[in-house]
Amino acid sequence: MRLGMIGLGRMGANIVRRLMRDGHECVVYDVSPDAVAALAGDGAAGSESIADLAAKLEAPRVVWLMIPAGITGAVVDQVAEVLEPGDIIIDGGNSNYKDDVRRAAKLRERGIHYVDVGTSGGVFGLDRGYCLMVGGPDEAVSVIEPILRTIAPGGGEIPRTPGREGDLAPEELGYLHCGPSGAGHFVKMVHNGIEYGIMASLAEGLNILDNADAGIRESEHSAEVAPLEEPEFYQFTIDTPKVAELWRRGSVISSWLLDLTAAALDSNPTLDGLAGRVSDSGEGRWTIKAAVDVGVPVPVLAASLFERFASRGEDHYANQLLSAMRLQFGGHQELPAGDVLEAGSRKAESA
Amino acid sequence: MRLGMIGLGRMGANIVRRLMRDGHECVVYDVSPDAVAALAGDGAAGSESIADLAAKLEAPRVVWLMIPAGITGAVVDQVAEVLEPGDIIIDGGNSNYKDDVRRAAKLRERGIHYVDVGTSGGVFGLDRGYCLMVGGPDEAVSVIEPILRTIAPGGGEIPRTPGREGDLAPEELGYLHCGPSGAGHFVKMVHNGIEYGIMASLAEGLNILDNADAGIRESEHSAEVAPLEEPEFYQFTIDTPKVAELWRRGSVISSWLLDLTAAALDSNPTLDGLAGRVSDSGEGRWTIKAAVDVGVPVPVLAASLFERFASRGEDHYANQLLSAMRLQFGGHQELPAGDVLEAGSRKAESA
Amino acid sequence: MRLGMIGLGRMGANIVRRLMRDGHECVVYDVSPDAVAALAGDGAAGSESIADLAAKLEAPRVVWLMIPAGITGAVVDQVAEVLEPGDIIIDGGNSNYKDDVRRAAKLRERGIHYVDVGTSGGVFGLDRGYCLMVGGPDEAVSVIEPILRTIAPGGGEIPRTPGREGDLAPEELGYLHCGPSGAGHFVKMVHNGIEYGIMASLAEGLNILDNADAGIRESEHSAEVAPLEEPEFYQFTIDTPKVAELWRRGSVISSWLLDLTAAALDSNPTLDGLAGRVSDSGEGRWTIKAAVDVGVPVPVLAASLFERFASRGEDHYANQLLSAMRLQFGGHQELPAGDVLEAGSRKAESA
Amino acid sequence: MRLGMIGLGRMGANIVRRLMRDGHECVVYDVSPDAVAALAGDGAAGSESIADLAAKLEAPRVVWLMIPAGITGAVVDQVAEVLEPGDIIIDGGNSNYKDDVRRAAKLRERGIHYVDVGTSGGVFGLDRGYCLMVGGPDEAVSVIEPILRTIAPGGGEIPRTPGREGDLAPEELGYLHCGPSGAGHFVKMVHNGIEYGIMASLAEGLNILDNADAGIRESEHSAEVAPLEEPEFYQFTIDTPKVAELWRRGSVISSWLLDLTAAALDSNPTLDGLAGRVSDSGEGRWTIKAAVDVGVPVPVLAASLFERFASRGEDHYANQLLSAMRLQFGGHQELPAGDVLEAGSRKAESA
């Protein structure tokens, strides 16, 4: 079928390429004429404006937006201007699902369908396919099903879940109509919340392994914070890059994020150049707020988000206060600054 | 090579079978003569006692224990009685690594080698192979490498980590000599700690999805705890079994534990018969204690352990105290008991 | 000075009484004529409607609302109808500070001042005074300062903070102008978030003490979940009511919430009749959402909120999923239901 | 009565002074002759060695140790050498209760009583009295009750818990016999665990207040991490020192730790010179390990400990790994280093 794509960044361009490979026709637009030209060279129909893009589609027009969440609202408005009742706008970006709910209601008044598609797959999606979480009205989702089927990974080589039989269901092909407008980004949001938790689990565990030599370091440096109670049990110098690779094979925690961890550690075993200031995007935050709204306890997911905040120093004032209190009640002085660096060099020396 | 196996439960028996398939000879013993007979029928050499088993091996004897952690210490002592300097005892069970450190030191005095092997793979290991985390002296580990290689999954179909070249390293075949005695179970312990975190991440996230209909339920039941602030944003009835299946395809959180979750939800979509009283084994606890010992922050892993404690009602007294305090300072009465059941039936009705 | 009070529940009525004791004149209104009559009997001027109340005040009129947060918006609108530019509406309830920001902006257009007053003190406020956190424009707050001063506790017997000299500052008298409209409820919100954390700290700690006899119980019941590793260290039968009382005297954690805990435990040492289903009000939730918004890590405060959710069974689906996963990968069966009750009766028997 | 005190640091010396004020006789010893001389000048009987100290006491001798936990074991052995059956050793320091259990058993064989006394009160104890948590055999505790009564705060001006009548119970006077040897330090350990939680609650909450101006800073600095969604709600510049002072008056969270926080902020409102590297002593760690042992969920207390670990950079490797994973799956680059400092100077500029 024919699709209009607005936004030709890495994700948008790759989705267009994946669609064209499978025989779909794509009309493309981007604020960068170069981006348009590049895809036109690959077989897409270029366009010079949103109106031009719309003119090159036929009713019911299907326009996919793959643009930063910050400008999605404005672009949806512009696109709606040049569409007609029965047409479909797809937001494949990282919008807050609440915005989907609001936008869908507004567009519904004009007879335009709004479909939100949460898209997971990162830089590997062109070949691996994208996992698609879809929200929107039934009639619109059924119209776009052919393109969802192409963008999704398909059954592939993943072993079928025991007990499932017959034709592959959509969720087995990698796309799912999750519910009305907003449901797609809601499911994607929670997916990312889970991702934070899994990443943190791996990172915390490997951090323990990296410190399994505390008893060795302890014996060298006597003036530590809290003396290690049983240094004889922390005498291990663990090769974490090898352990990450090992766990990919037959272990209960094998996972794609572990694959990435193993790859990262293999290419940069000492993690040189990484300051450990971990960014977070909106989804992790929205997940916690949604859980709080509906009263679901998420201590693990929340802790994984807060670790990221703290990694960027956002715990600084709280920590100063703790030191200030300790100074008050016990006359306890702070450790001298610079111990972290020392700890780092200490490890480096013994490595 | 030839190996003695003590303990023919599911894990022990399957490891013997996997070894024999690959040409190794196994002498087996178990307190249950039936278990011995069953494996003898599959080609193993049965034995009637630990001494008998030892007599059927040749120096350096290699004896693998696959028995409950609670009796490992006693059995290690019995085995050591019938072994000679240069022989090797392997503990493949779930011992605390601290016990490994202690036992290895004791056996070292008698010239007997002690090797601890953390084994992951669950009920799927016979075919899939077991991920092996090994601790012990170099000379003993090199002796047993042929059997480790057989028990491990091997390279299999798992894509190689980008950048790795040449012959497959041991960790790529699924086994790794992690360090001296205790290191194997230490790494396995942390592996299980991570497992708790990943499981909790998935469970918490899916719980949010399961409650994404809070705004619908809210409108039906007006006397809720804390009124939902924006019910219009929680109008989704998400099919969590389908979502779990979907995420197996191309998403960032695809993992073996997600595969299991999808299988569990496909076979029992409403989780009938599960009370949600989650057990924990020693490894999750030891992980937290080790992290506390070495001063590594593990808020995510700890929260995942504490959730399990709470699932079994171990938070009861604390919660009573909270209600008692609220009663004191504000005259706040508790909610009537039974609301959980109501919530359950409510969901059932609307499903 | 003269004040109109709308809402004569426990808090509103007690504030009126405290004001009149100090010589202020109060015009009062409530939807319940009985509540109005009761306070009229104590010396207040009753009124029959909001309009009547307004008519009995003189410009600039000051109207204090002490009503449930759910109806505050509607009542503010009604009051604004009968006020004039320069008049002042005070919201002393538990509104979300975001609503304050919105309402203040709306009223500002009509020249009416809006002041939000976060009020802490519970049932003890009539005698002890209320801690007042105030948000609003300078000119309005200065008008109402006399009544703030009366409602607040004053300097009282609380020792002055070392280093402070001269006249007591407002914050030493128990009220503080924290910033523009919304700032009062914002500070009150965070206050309550902290309260959750302190309550949870006390409850968790006392729960450990209550289980310090695990080693005694262990020896009686062999088939426990995870065997206690060193039962010899958990042989204490701690009298938690006495410990709570003890800590009130000279310990670092002495606090009003500990006072309440001691009182609760003294009056009901076995916490009979408390199911441990802990409610939460909006402030605890808003605190976490605000922290997430501004990127401040609050693992402790969040954990204390999530404990309450879990105490009401909102972790049920997540826990079922964990059991379902365990069943999949290891064939692990759940513990039989009813163990909690058994645990309870066990303790009761041994007590 | 007569008491021997070994260890004349701040705590030991102050306890001796408090005892002598109340008429008790003290024989004192310290490795520093100057410390002995100083107290001798105040009326104590000095001694030149542990044997000398023992010789100056009469059976049953009572010797109180107030020394660092690290050397307590060795000194207990030395003291035991010069004591006789029926004599009493008191450990008033910060020992791990497990060491108490072990030491008491060893001394019991020689007929010597061992009493552990957890002591809370910090630098204020001389005047305020110390809260005493006592473990040991009944007959020994009853012997030393007169000195416990003197060291404890007594009833003082703290309002009596409603419902309590008649003579003040020991716990109302500030000391309590909690159980057999070890019980005192066990209760003290949990006390400190709670202290960590309360301190963290206050620090986290005040950190939110300190960042309530995020919407103002946001408008000045456009290239932030995750854009603030509703900057209009974070326009407050809160004076946290004043708020801490305010909450001391009539609020639900009034507490001694809040008093200290207010004092700290009043004397150093910008917390100059504090790097926020928060130390932890053994008790906080032991509390978490004890909770894990007995299966009690303590997410709040654990989070408060882990925050301290993270404040000292012990989360560094984990954070590097998170950044490494993000780089792998999305090509996400880290934020430039130095943003924390910028954030600090930014706040300073706007202050």
Image: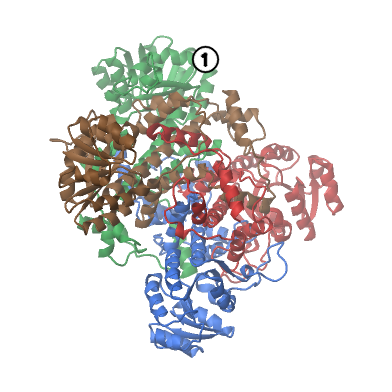
Chain colours: A blue, B red, C brown, D green
* D17 horizontally vs D61: left or right: left
Q: Secondary structure at mark 1?
A: loop
Residue at 42 percent across and 33 percent down: it is B327
Quarter-wise, where is residue C198 in the image? top left
**In the rendered view, would you say A163 is above or below A317?**
below
The extreme top residue here reads D58
**In the rendered view, would you say D147 is above or below A285?**
above
Quarter-wise, where is residue D26 in the image? top left
* C1 horizontally vs C223: left or right: left
For the N terminus of chain D, give its image quadrant.
Answer: top left
Which is nearer the eye, A43 or A27?
A27
Q: Position of residue D328 (x, y in %)?
A: 49, 68
Q: Which residue is mark 1?
A: D111
Q: Position of residue A77 (x, y in %)?
A: 39, 76
Q: In the rendered image, is residue A332 in sight?
A: no
Given the image, what chain letter belongs to the residue carrying mark 1?
D
Residue at 25 percent across and 35 percent down: it is C16
Q: Position of residue B311 (x, y in %)?
A: 57, 43
Which is nearer the eye, D92 or D70?
D92
Quarter-wise, where is residue C199 in the image? top left
Disc 1 marks a residue whose amino acid type is: Gly
For the C terminus of chain D, give its image quadrant.
Answer: bottom left
